[in-house]
Amino acid sequence: MSSKAFKQPASLRALSIGFMAFWLLLAAFPFLWTLWGSFKVELDFFSKADWTDALTGARTVAEKGTAFTGAGYEGAWVQEEFWRSVINTSIVCFCVVVTSLTIGTLGGYALSRSTYRYTFWLLIIALIFRAMPPITLVSGYLLPFFAWNLWGVLPTTIIVLVAINQPFTLWMLHSFFQKIPKELDESAKVDGCSQFQAFRHVIIPVMWPGVVTTGLFSFLLAYNDFAVTSMLLSKDNQTMVPKIASFLGTTQTEGNVMFAVASVVSATAPLFVLVMVFQRQIVSGLTAGAVKG
């Protein structure tokens, strides 16, 4: 059959390109607008008199002598020591991802190869636990943490985030393992591998895109969490999201909105880089179920 039969009409191709361009603009605009506004003063970016002040930077020029200023970043990172929250977030994310993937890969592989009926019920219980709002689970941890003087530190928050995230990790990795033929395990055993050696040297290399995809979702859970971290961490150990919220102030205390705007840009930019670096592994992991090796 001629390739012309599969060629899109010019009008449909133009419509598709136009829709994609519109969608990208719509999705990217909030971040680009926030990025632009982070270099302005508050009276410009949140001007009620004329929204074009955010573009021209009239008050920014009047106050700082230039249309752009890094005062928001300096205030957040230096004055308010936002870098401490970045370090705390990095520690929490690293520990949550490593722990969740370790337990999830071992548990998911074991459940995918199990022939017992209780496997299904374990997964259902895990799903019910994951469906519960995290805030309802956190309340159960508060009393023992206060009683044992463990409230406010990073390890307790890591434990709770792993507990909340583990059912999702287990389900996702279990589904990936089920798509890998059991013949691969049997072939490895014929070649002299033990069960764990087959898992490590044969299954995991095949599963790597799925592991990366699951790890990224685990990372995003810990990175973007607010409910758990705001309740379980003290002011000195805050991660980025609660720290950004504290810049906004409360009804009793005045905040600095531009510190929050600059911090939002600082916290969002690494996510774009992360997705761009691992985009191939993410796509491979999400489509792994379509092909059996």
Image (tube, grey):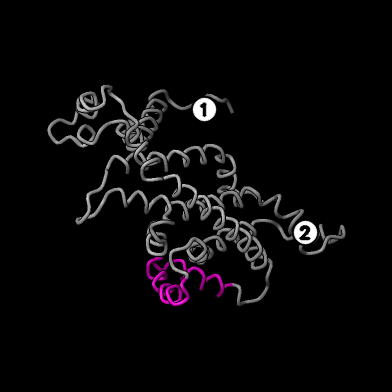
Whether 285 is among the magenta residues is: no
The answer to whether 194 is drawn above or below residue 27 in the figure is below
Give the residue at mark 1.
5
The N terminus, quarter of image: top right
Q: Are marks 2 and 1 in contact (CB under 8 Å)?
A: no
User: Overall secondary structure of the magenta stretch?
Assistant: helix
Q: Nearer the viewer, residue 208 or 41?
A: 41
The answer to whether 123 is drawn above or below residue 168 in the figure is below
Q: Nearer the viewer, residue 239 or 19?
A: 239
Identity of the residue drawn at 66% across and 52% down: 207
Q: Which residues are magenta?
A: 120-149
The answer to whether 202 is drawn above or below residue 109 in the figure is above
* Residue placed furthest toward the front: 79
Identity of the residue drawn at 42% across and 70% down: 137
Give the residue at mark 2.
198
Q: Amino acid at mark 1?
A: Ala
Report the disc number at residue 111: none
The Cα atoms of the two marked residues, 2 and 1, are separated by 47 Å
Q: Position of residue 285 (x, y in %)?
A: 59, 48
Say what secondary structure mark 2 lies in.
Answer: helix
Q: Position of residue 164 (x, y in %)?
A: 48, 65
Left/right placement of residue 48 relative to residue 191 reads left
